Image (spheres, helix red, strand yellow):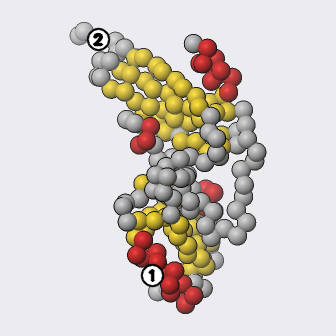
Amino acid sequence: MNHIPSLLVFVAACFSVHSNTVPCDNCCYNCNGVTTQEECNLITKCGRHETCYVRKKTERKLNVLYESGCLSERVCNALHTIQQGTVGKRDHEAVLTNCFDCCSSNNTAPCNRDLCTPNPPKLPPGYKICYSCSGVEKPEYCERTITCTTDQSCHVHAKMNFLYDALRYDLGCQSKSVCAALERL
């Protein structure tokens, strides 16, 4: 049996993020059943007529949970119109909606991270939110985020496998000293 070694080429790049959040066109944080919005690190791209939303709810056993994602702009507008009468009331499953809010995030970072959070925690100075994925076809396909510390930068690592003619990307945090070494190559 003849084994052909796969030839891999690694290309890595570090970059500075000038804000502390990831840029994304019409993207929202998308989670269900997290106890705080800060726990949500999944991002989804919304459809053309959709907007970001967050619903904070208290379940029968008094667990406070958040759900977030994309919702039709029409539905969000309608819910805002009738919100005064629905927030604070239980639905048929005995779930109390404490808060429901929508926002639009065109050409910015996802806007729904701090909705329904009275005093949203701020990232410490110098910390940033970066994409975090392994083996994605394109960096823009990454749908997870991670918080990087002050001694880290956002990092993209491209791997080319010439045997399969496949380029894959790893994204995440990388030590600034490693980034500086990569820049000298």
Residue found at x 68% / y 27%: 176
**Where the N terminus falls, by quadrant?**
top left
Q: Is residue 68 or residue 25 the one in the foreground?
A: 25
State the image quarter where residue 18 is shown. top right
Among the 4 quarters of the image, the one containing residue 100: bottom right
Using the image, determine if residue 51 lies above or below residue 135.
below
Q: In this view, does 94 lie above or below 15?
A: below
Q: In this view, does 94 lie above or below 47?
A: below
Query: Which disc, if any, is residue 3?
Result: 2
User: Which residue sits at x=72%, y=58%?
Assistant: 121
Tell me residue 126's x, y (percent).
Answer: 73, 41
Residue 167 image offset from top left, x and y in percent: 37, 27
* Residue type at tag 2: His
The residue located at (47%, 35%) in the rendering is 134
Compared across the picture, whether 96 is left or right of 166 comes to right
In the rendered image, the residue lying farthest to the left is 1
Q: Which of the pair 144/153 is nearer the observer?
A: 153
Residue 78 is tagged as 1
Q: Where is residue 173 in the image (x, y as percent from the top left)?
A: 61, 35
Q: Looking at the image, can residue 61 be seen?
A: no
Residue for point 56% across, 62% down: 112
